[in-house]
Amino acid sequence: MGYARQTIHRWVAAYKVGGKDALCATKASGATAKLTKKQTAWLAKTLISKNPAQLRFPFALWTREIVRELIKRRFRVTMALTSVGNLLRRLGFSVQRPLMRAYERNPEAVKRWLAVEYPEIRAQAKRVRGLIFFEDESGIRSDYHSGTTWAPRGKTPVVLRTGKRVSCNMLSAVSARGELRFMVRRGGVGAAVFIQFLKRLMHGVRHPIFLIVDGHPSHHARMTQRFIESLNGKLRLFFLPGYSPDLNPDELVWRHVKHHDIGRQLLRDAAELIPKVHASLRGLQRRPEIVRSFFTTPTTCYAGR
């Protein structure tokens, strides 16, 4: 049967000591762990609580290479990249796309907004039957693209589209009820354009509007303030904490338009951009269930309650 003499002697010796049970196959023990439980616990805590830049690495994202270097620096243990990946999976880690936050963001201001300021705005709106909208602006270019496509392995596909660059700006406002108001234009967005959008937003609305915006200069302009004052309380402006776009559900409108729609369409001519953007926003306007979903993410659900 091809077994070595040494193997036969080992089996006979095992049988003499433990009988048939000693000959039963057992699960291989595997390689000995290179890190102790204490070292593994320290590694997991460090990866959760710190980023590589805090430990004087040149990058801000945890990769297998950087984790391997961290293990080598801290414990003088050398590990293969495959072993590092297996260790990270055993610790409950997975590869994820990180969310970016600005250094200038004030965590205390965000906490105050969520715990005090927005609840007060909601209470005020409820007293006067006001409508709460979140507003934002964004731009898009004709050469923007997103998404992936299937193709033979090793052969990168080529999609032909216009090489001319033209851009447009979009303004929109959304409510937790699924309402969407928008305006598309070519050129910059200043106070005059913002006021034009506000007039459209208020058209046909009988109740006061509580509009929540970011710190864009057009929102703070004197012209804008004078226009709001002239409305005698029909429109009230409130400001999100600085550098906190994740708190604004209207940001998800742009992700839908850019990444899930326009970025995957074929633009044969730059002149097609604005009509396609307008059609995309109009289609989203007819899908209130999608707009309502923008108020259900972990960072925007506070506004959907």
Image (cartoon, rainbow, N blue to C red):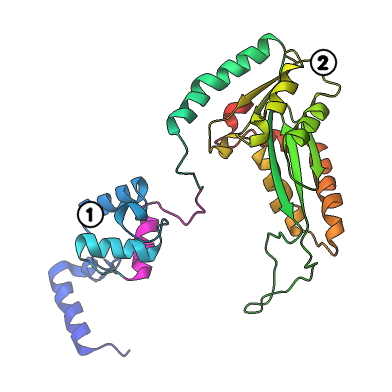
Horizontal arrangement in the rendering, residue 208 relative to residue 251 (left or right): right
Magenta includes 24?
A: no
| Residue projecting furthest to the top | 127
Find the magenta span and give its range.
80-99
Tell me the residue at 64%/29% (across/down).
220
Q: Secondary structure at mark 2?
A: loop
Q: Which image quadrant is residue 5 in?
A: bottom left
Tell me the residue at 65%/27% (across/down).
212
Percent across and percent down for residue 67 are 34, 61
- Name which residue type carries label 1: Gln
CA gap, disc 1 and disc 2: 64 Å
Percent across and percent down for residue 177 are 73, 26
Give the residue pinned by disc 1.
39
Q: Which image quadrant is residue 55 in?
A: bottom left
Horizontal arrangement in the rendering, residue 98 relative to residue 209 (left or right): left
The crowding category of the residue bearing disc 1, from other C-alpha atoms within 10 Å (few below 14, some 14 to 19, many at least 20), is few
Give the residue pinned by disc 2.
206
Name the foreground residue: 241 vs 72. Answer: 241
Percent across and percent down for residue 156 are 66, 75
- Above or below, 75 relative to 105: below
In the rendered image, which quarter contains the C terminus? Answer: top right
Q: How many marks?
A: 2
- Name which residue type carries label 2: Arg
